[in-house]
Amino acid sequence: MQNLSTSELRLTGITCWALWNDRDALINKKKIPEALIKVEWILKYAEEVRMKYHNGMKRRIPRVNEWRPPLGGVVKMNTDAAVSEEGSGVGVLLREGNAEIVGAMVDFHMVKTPLLAKILAIREGLSLATRLGVHRVVVETDSLEALNLIGDKSPWKGEAVSWVEDIRAFARDFQEICFQHVFRESNAVAYHLGRETISLRCGFLWRLDFPIWLGRLAEAGKQNSVALMAF
């Protein structure tokens, strides 16, 4: 251990922590992520810690402004929702490691609470992923509160209780699934889809042929220039 660098020690500690969490999950008969997904999480967390504590000095974690592709064989699903006085629009986009779009959907709901809308977006996204035959998925959302409810880390469920149960039921259908919290910037495409849907007040689903504008929107999301795009 004395010959390890600071970064290697940090990575070792995070790996041990992750393995301990998996041990607890197995003891409680819970599903644990596949090795590739676990490695992706460990490396991402280690990088965030490195940026926060560079040279032993505590710093603010820089906001990641771009979408990061998943590892091979895994589909990354971004979900979000925009809320107005009329209701909410949810947006979902699924992409592979090469950034190719696998599927997408938008829908309008008479839900006027941001948290409920974001939970609903995750539910709609998992439903779509199931229909598309996705087996390994990383679900990204910018709502930490929604993830706490899904992970049963928060005692409040309220109106969302049935949707949370649906999400857990869908999750059991996947070979591997991982929920991740991300900053709004790297989830901008899903938010943009939801926001534009409010004015349309209807839903669309794309699973084979994708409109040109959707491809451009996804590409813009990689450069954090989604605001320039429109339906």
Image (cartoon, rainbow, N blue to C red):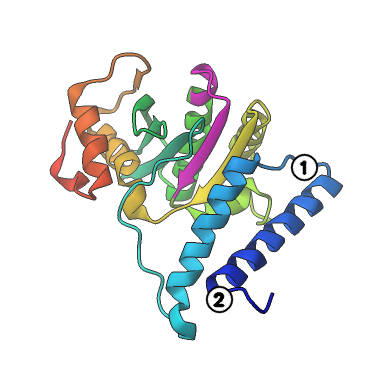
Q: Mark 1 or 2 closer to N-term?
A: 2
Circle 1 — which element? Answer: loop
Judge left or right: residue 22 versus residue 13: right
- Whether residue 138 is in magenta: the answer is yes
Q: Is residue 187 above or below residue 212?
A: below
Inspect the magenta stretch and tell me whether residue 197 lies in it: no
Percent position of residue 188, x then y = 30, 46
In terms of secondary structure, where does tag 2 sit?
helix
Residue on which disc 2 sits: 6
Residue 15 drawn above or below residue 89: below
What kind of residue is marked 1? Lys
- Residue at the far bottom in the pictured view: 57
Classify residue 196 as left or right of residue 120: left
The residue at the point 50 percent across, 40 percent down is 139
Q: Residue 51 at x, y = what percent?
A: 43, 71
Give the quadrant of the N terminus. bottom right
Quarter of the image where the C terminus is located: top left
Q: Which mark is residue 30?
A: 1
Spatial separation of the CA atoms under disc 1 and disc 2: 33 Å
Where is residue 76, by image quadrant? top left
184 over 31 or under it: above or below: below
Q: Nearer the viewer, residue 101 or 157?
A: 101
Where does residue 223 sit, x and y in percent of width and height? Answer: 23, 48
Q: Residue furthest right?
A: 27
Quadrant location of residue 197?
Answer: top left
Residue at horizontal 83%, vertical 42%?
A: 29
- Which residue is at 47% across, 31% downward? 125
44, above or below 51, in the image: above
Magenta span = 129-141
Residue type marked 2? Thr
